Amino acid sequence: MRRLSFALLALALAASPATAQSHLEARNRWARLCEMRREKFDRILPEAMRENGIDMWIVAMREGHHDPLWEMLGRGYVGTRGYFIFTDRGGDRIERIAIDVTDHNRAACGAYDPTPAFTDLATFVKERNPKRIGLNLSTEMGMADGLSHTLHTEIVAALGPTYASRITSAEKLISDFSSRRVTSELVAFGDATEMGRQIAERALSNEVITPGVTTLAEVAWWIQEQPLQRGLGSSFEVPSIYITGPNGIEATSNDRIIQRGDIIMIDFGVGYLNMWTDQKRIAYVLKPGEVALPKSIQHAFDQAVKVREVIRKTAKPGKTAQVMMDEVIAAIAAAGFTPMRGFNQVRDDASTEFIIGSHSLGDWGHGIGPSMAFFNPGRLKFEMRASNLFSIELFAYTPMPEWGGKKLRIPLEDDAVVTARGVEWLSPINHRVQLIR
């Protein structure tokens, strides 16, 4: 019995640190998110509301139908109806009230003002008499389009004709508020990019891949397991694990077995502290007798790196994303590369072609801030600001002699912040093609 008792005590002691550590991690993440929220409300929200001429912003939701900004604004249990309401009442801060959104730790966080006596939405709005009321309605961005048709109808009816006529889309306000970052967010995003980098580089190694045995799907499942173990989210659900050959992408995240001589790409992102990444990595599976990357593949990779370096040196805040993208493309062309006619529309010539898709991120893998990307046309109109997060994404297509001149597509994608000095990386970027032996 004494031996059994000692054994049980040892097991209990061994389990205690893990339990305590789990508790500390939950509280640590809560504290970091609170700090980020307080800073954004104090530093970013006033300028975002005033620049967009909105003096009341209402974020409405229902149980089982949270607004996409629910996490960013502080979470909480929503019953029949719940509101986060932000009102510019003058001074250097915005009034921020959570109504019928229950959070027992909200007061400890301190991001929100105490909830006043609340009778109904119409009375609350009338007391503040806003000139323009922003609601989450957007044709461009899903994250800014969280208001359901039913809730919109109810709000319009509740406010009556006078105040309903003052309703406008909060789309640009939401973009500005989310995409302009405080330092605590940049720290969290740096942590997220480093976690993503480690997962991607481990996935493209012999730890995970055995040539002739492992399938693309098995690599994808391994990657999907990692966020579960680390308490992370996923930007794009099933990661893209694909083989590239003379005719482009041959297979993606399926039962194709990885063979020697394959060129493998990973495209995925993780979520941590409401920061979402988008990253790529590349690997080559050595053929029998090979000990290094073939020179033609190394050359193609080096060409892509040169394109990335031009983006890094050229992109700066202070202009719209469209103007900045035009300047970046011109600078890359001046460096000797050929702008691609359209995505994957490869010319039959000896040039290295390129196309860029350097998009916003952070609030999601494809974010809602200004984007130098052809697939985010509305966001090309937004001005780039210092602290905006960007995926510096590009594709370079270089002829391969062993493919009869057909071009190898090299994708590079690393996450960065735009500062007054230009593009700055938040974790080690992709400097090599990894080798799988």
Image: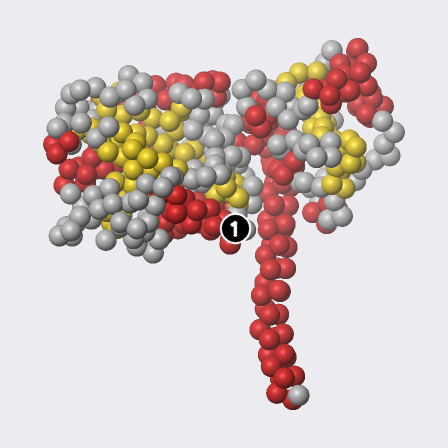
> Can you say whether 11 is above or below 255 in the image?
below
Quadrant in the picture for residue 68: top right
Q: Nearer the viewer, residue 223 or 75?
A: 223
Q: Is residue 284 visible?
A: no
Label 1: which residue?
228
Determine the residue positioned at 12% across, 34% down.
Answer: 402
Q: Amino acid at mark 1?
A: Leu
Q: Residue 228: x, y in percent? A: 52, 50
Element at label 1: helix
Crowd tier of the residue under label 1, counting other residues whose Cα lies within 10 Å: few below 14, some 14–19, many 20 or above: few
Quadrant in the picture for residue 178: top right
- Most extreme residue toward the bottom is 2
Q: Residue 7: x, y in percent? A: 60, 81
Q: Residue 164: x, y in percent? A: 75, 14
Determine the residue positioned at 51% across, 54% down.
Answer: 229
Colour scheme in use = secondary structure
Q: Nearer the viewer, residue 119 or 204?
A: 204
Determine the residue positioned at 24% across, 33% down.
Answer: 245
> Can you say whether 18 is above or below 116 in the image?
below
Left/right placement of residue 84 relative to residue 48 reads: right
